[in-house]
Amino acid sequence: MSISIDLAGQVAVVTGGGSGIGEAISKTLARAGASVGIADLSAESAERVAKEIAADGGQAVAAAVDIASRESIEAGLAVIRSALGPVAHLVNNAATWSVKPFADHTPTEIDRVIGVTLTGTMAVTQAALADIVAQAGSIVVISSDGARIGERYMSVYAAAKAGLIGLTKSLAREVGRYQVNVNAIAPGTTNTPGSAGFIEQAGGQEKLARAYPLGRIGEPQDIANAALFLVSPLSSWMTGQVLSVSGGFTMV
């Protein structure tokens, strides 16, 4: 007897789906049969991932989306709906950050991190929520272990990601009656282009890995596997949860 995850006929939207963790999630959901809307600030990156999914036999459409803009969100979702249909699953992965002492953050930097990471995620979720409720779908929010235990030089980012945990738990209570699951993933340090600066400042992968019981930092596929689980029927009785995918770095 075998267990398989089949998302055929279901549309999943992944924000920040054109690189790093978002790219891995987009490709993993597509391999499970989902039609994937790749929403990314970079139209070029989104198109590349969509083409790679198509070359692998999957179905995907790219949409250039700045989640700090509600107009851009609505336009991007219109492209995805027109090509694929209504949204059943939303993976809120897009974020931005600044690695520096809290006192050195400018008001503009703070507004950008909060505006994309927290407010932008709320805006995308609002825009897709009616579709998801109608299909008893799911929402996955990519938070961070930094939001749970703190991270030096990333106070603004950690605050935004902590806000996402509050959003996850509260929204789960609100939409559970519609059989919509809302859960969060809290990755540990993951080897992506976006985290390269932080990894370098922390002394490199080898040094960071010593803090992890499993002896390595994360790879994008580690997070993608958890996202697949959370949009699948295997997690149908889970909602309002924060799943740390961090090699044992965080045990709470």
Image: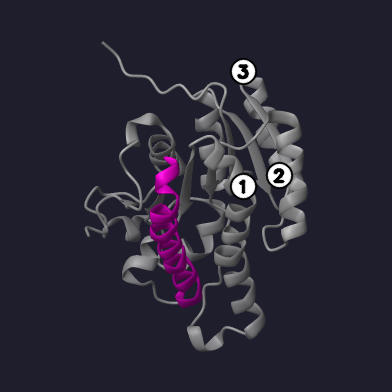
Residue 5 covered by magenta stretch:
no
Tally of marks: 3
Given contact means CB atoms under 8 Å apart, are the residues at marks 1 and 2 in contact?
Answer: yes
| In front: label 2 or label 3 | 2
Residue 178 covered by magenta stretch:
yes
The kind of residue on which mark 2 rests is Leu
Asked if 34 appears above or below 75 in the picture, the reply is above
User: What's the CA distance linking mark 1 and mark 2?
Assistant: 8 Å
Is the residue marked by circle 2 packed among few (<14), some (14-19), or many (20+) residues within 10 Å?
Answer: many
Residue 249, given in percent of the width and then of the height, sits at 27, 57
Q: Residue at point 62% right, 69% down?
A: 115
- Closer to the chain start, of discs 1 and 3, is 3
Q: How is the image coloured?
A: one colour
First to last magenta residue range: 154-182
Q: Nearer the viewer, residue 217 or 165?
A: 165
Q: Residue at point 59% right, 78% down?
A: 110
Q: Secondary structure at mark 2?
A: helix
Residue identifier under label 3: 57
Q: Secondary structure at mark 1?
A: helix
Residue identifier under label 2: 77
The kind of residue on which mark 3 rests is Gly
Q: Which residue is situated farthest in the top direction here?
A: 1
Residue 91, given in percent of the width and then of the height, sits at 52, 45
Q: Which mark is residue 142?
A: none
Most frequent secondary structure within the magenta stretch = helix
- Closer to the chain start, of discs 2 and 3, is 3
Residue identifier under label 1: 128
**Do we see residue 137 in this rendering?**
yes
Asked if 83 appears above or below 25 in the picture, the reply is above
